[in-house]
Image (cartoon, helix red, strand yellow):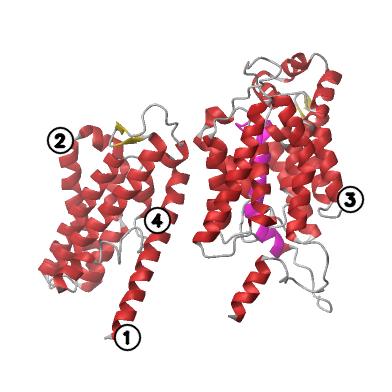
Amino acid sequence: MENWKIFAKGLILENPILVLALSLCPAIAVTSSVMTAITMGLTVTYVITLNNVVVSLIKNFVNPKVRVPIYITSIATIVTIAVLVLKAYAPSLYKELGIYLELVVVFAIILARAEVFASKNSVGRSFLDGFGMGCGFLGAMVIIGAIREVLGNGTFLGFSVFGQAYDPALIMILPPGGFILIGYLVALFKMINDSREKRQRIRGESA
Amino acid sequence: MSTEVINNNVVSNEIYVSSSPHMLSEVSTKKIMWTVFATLMPAVIFAVYYFGMPALTTIILSVLSAVIFEALVQKLRKKQVTVSDGSAALTGLLLAMCLPASVPFYVPIAGSFIAIVVAKQAMGGLGQNIFNPAHIGRAALMVSWPVAMTTWTNVRYTDAVTSATPLNVLKLQGYDALINMFGSQSEMYKSLFLGLRNGSLGETSVVLLVLGGLVLIFKRYIDWVMPACMIGTVGILTWIFGPDGFFTGDALFHMMAGGLIIGAFFMITDYVTTPITRKGQIIFAIGCGVITVLIRLLGGYPEGVCYSILLMNCATPLIDRFVRPVQYGRK
């Protein structure tokens, strides 16, 4: 139960993009199509999970004064692996993602999880935390990417949704549409979390 | 309970939250909005006469969808539905005036959605919005459907032949081509003044728009200073920075072309998104004029009224702070 809570908090309660509002830059930049959003989401899930495990493993040997450079080195190593794999097996996707794939190194959410959670918890718990956060990130990216691609291009994963008659609203695949959409999604998640909190309070009072 | 009553009263304009002096007047938001709506009617009727049925459907779609979106969002936000105050209908009408007549049916609906839901209600409703909703709607449409938004088809007079607006001709082909388009210079002024030219619905007839604006000034709903400053700034600057060196520009053309007249009389005189004090309003209007001229003469777009007003909307809080009146007795 406790393990499930560690994993699940990243999905909605502390969703990295839509609640913690970290890593908004990729959430705008690479979500203009579902495919790039999924690739970026999977990459980040992989990096954040593995990095949490590494940080948790070395937490007893690291001098707190130099912990950030060490975390960044670890993240950079893991990201480099991901970049090389993508370059080798999916060069066109790699080209589409451009600079943002390398920039995963400095995503705030990855360093934040290492600092806040992995450096203080056991390997298993850190793994679950990283995986949960990664899944929350992936989910948010896919939601944003799907809405933007469907409205802004009339397609989903490249397949036409509405047929020829649909005249796509270009604003949705341009940055302004991304900002507006993320604003509304943040409001939606706030609503979900608020109503959940209210339910829990009522349950607590009646118990 | 008591706060609810107060809130409802504020919404229905029976109680005003305002700075002193607390004088009661007969003028209400509802009355002002519907008066502005009525003063736009001559220009609307002329646009329908000149552009034909597509203009009418565009206007009706825009106004109706704006009203429906406003009611829906207010229901969702559990607020009192205040569509009868006319502010949503006016936003819809002003948005339609910024559109070409021949846009597809979904364009005015999407524009009203952006204007009402995103630019107005998401900010907190009437009185809370930072940007002019109608112009936000137009800017979003400009980005979304650039082709539809820049295709001007005059159904009545040229048998659905697409032709460019005067400002477009000036930007792409130069001043001589512009004169050729109308025949002679005086002919050009006449067409611009009467509204016999291509363009968005509300940027055609100068004389009808000015008449509507004058009614508003006469009723003291708007201050004459703002339109005068904006149009004057555009005139002076375009005259100074003419195509053949200093003081050679065609100020009269620039003052009558494009959306300047409707922008100066109906857009920058919006109470919500512009500065409160007169000094602030003058700064605002001159800023709008300067940016309009910059976009027209140097920018990539042929017309810059919409963007100039949106950009100055950003600066409104800053201007308000800068020109804050001194309290009596203070230095």
- Are the residues flagged by discs 4 and 2 from a single subunit? yes
Q: Earlier in the sequence, mark 4 or mark 2?
A: 2
**Badge 1 density bin: few <14, some 14–19, many ≥20, Cα 10 Å:** few
Query: Mark 2 — residue?
Result: A89
Given this view, does label 1 or label 3 mark the residue nearer the observer? Answer: 1
Q: Quadrant of residue B176?
A: top right
CA separation, marks 4 and 2? Answer: 33 Å
In screen coordinates, is B158 left or right of A107? right
User: In this view of the protein, can residue B58 be seen by the observer?
Assistant: yes
Chain ID of residue with mark 3: B
**Residue A198 x %, y %:** 36, 75
Inspect the image, locate mark 4, and give the three-letter code of the amino acid beneath it: Leu
Give B118 or B189, whichever is nearer the viewer.
B118
> Are the residues at dot 4 and dot 2 in contact (C-beta closer than 8 Å)?
no
Point 83% across, 53% down: residue: B223
Under circle 3, the secondary element is helix
Q: Is residue B328 above or below residue A41?
A: below
Query: Mark 4 — residue?
Result: A185
**Badge 4 density bin: few <14, some 14–19, many ≥20, Cα 10 Å:** some
In screen coordinates, is A4 left or right of B258? left
**Badge 3 density bin: few <14, some 14–19, many ≥20, Cα 10 Å:** few
Report the magenta residues as a range: B295-321
Chain ID of residue with mark 2: A
- Are the residues flagged by discs 3 and 2 from a single subunit? no
Query: Mark 3 — residue?
Result: B218
Query: Mark 1 — residue?
Result: A205
Point 68% across, 37% down: residue: B97
Chain ID of residue with mark 4: A
Chain ID of residue with mark 1: A
CA separation, marks 1 and 2? Answer: 55 Å
Point 59% across, 47% down: residue: B66
